[in-house]
Image (tube, rainbow, N blue to C red):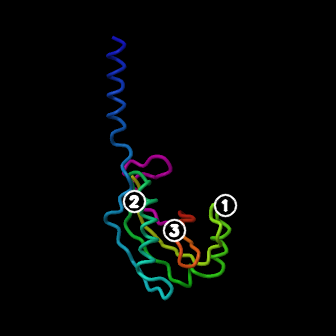
Amino acid sequence: MKKIITVMLCIVLVLLFAGCGKNGDTSKVEIDYGASSVYSKEEIDSAIEIIKKQFASFEGCELHSLSYMPDEECNNADNIEWMNNLRTDDNKEAFTQCIAFESSFRSPEKGGGAWEANEEYTWSWWLARSEGGEWNLMTWGY
């Protein structure tokens, strides 16, 4: 009898958690590349891919838009200094470039965790790199 109850409990738990773990959806995101005299479309796309990868961990959320912030708003001395202040010990090289995006996304229908149920959020995403190197996602939110 104990064995049957244990098996039934396991089945119930599996069914309860089967809906959990749905990755953040980036399949329908609209991209606004704006106009950059600093970065090529390929460089912007490589930063976007890093954002999408992080967003995939936002269970049940749906990314609606990503908009490149103008060069003068993100790639300036103050923001590069800020990115370097956020740098971790494993980033040995100083950052010389940064890029930023505004986003909008919908939270899970039922909410949960830090999310309000079925709300539209607008967040910023900031990435940095050394001249021509790989982008590092430094901070996001707010």
Report the residue at 35% width, 68% height from top.
Answer: 29
Q: Nearer the viewer, residue 65 or 44?
A: 44
Work out how far the residue at label 2 is from the one at label 3, CA to CA, in angstroms. Answer: 16 Å
Q: What residue does disc 2 label?
A: 106
**Mark 1 or 3, nearer chain start:** 1
Compared to 130, does 64 lie above or below?
A: above
The 10 Å Cα crowd at callout 2, few under 14, some 14 to 19, many 20 or more, is many
Residue 41's label in the rendered image is none
Please state if 102 lies on the left or on the right of 16 as rendered.
right
Q: Is residue 119 magenta?
A: yes
Residue type, label 1: Asp
Please tell me whether mark 2 sits on a helix, a strand or a loop. Answer: strand
Name the residue furthest bottom.
37
Assess disc 3: are there few (<14), some (14-19) or many (≥20) residues with their C-alpha within 10 Å of its C-alpha: many
Alpha carbon separation for disc pair 1 and 3: 21 Å
Q: Residue at x 36, y 26 (%)?
A: 10
Q: Which residue is mark 3?
A: 125
Type of amino acid at the residue the image marks with label 3: Trp
Disc 1 target residue: 89
Whether residue 117 is in magenta: the answer is yes
Quadrant of res 86: bottom right
| Extent of the magenta region | 109-124
The percent position of residue 96, horizontal first and vertical second, equals 61, 78
Disc nearest the viewer among 1 and 2: 1
Name the amino acid, label 2.
Arg
Image spot of residue 119 (x, y percent)? 42, 58
- First-in-chain label (2 vs 3): 2
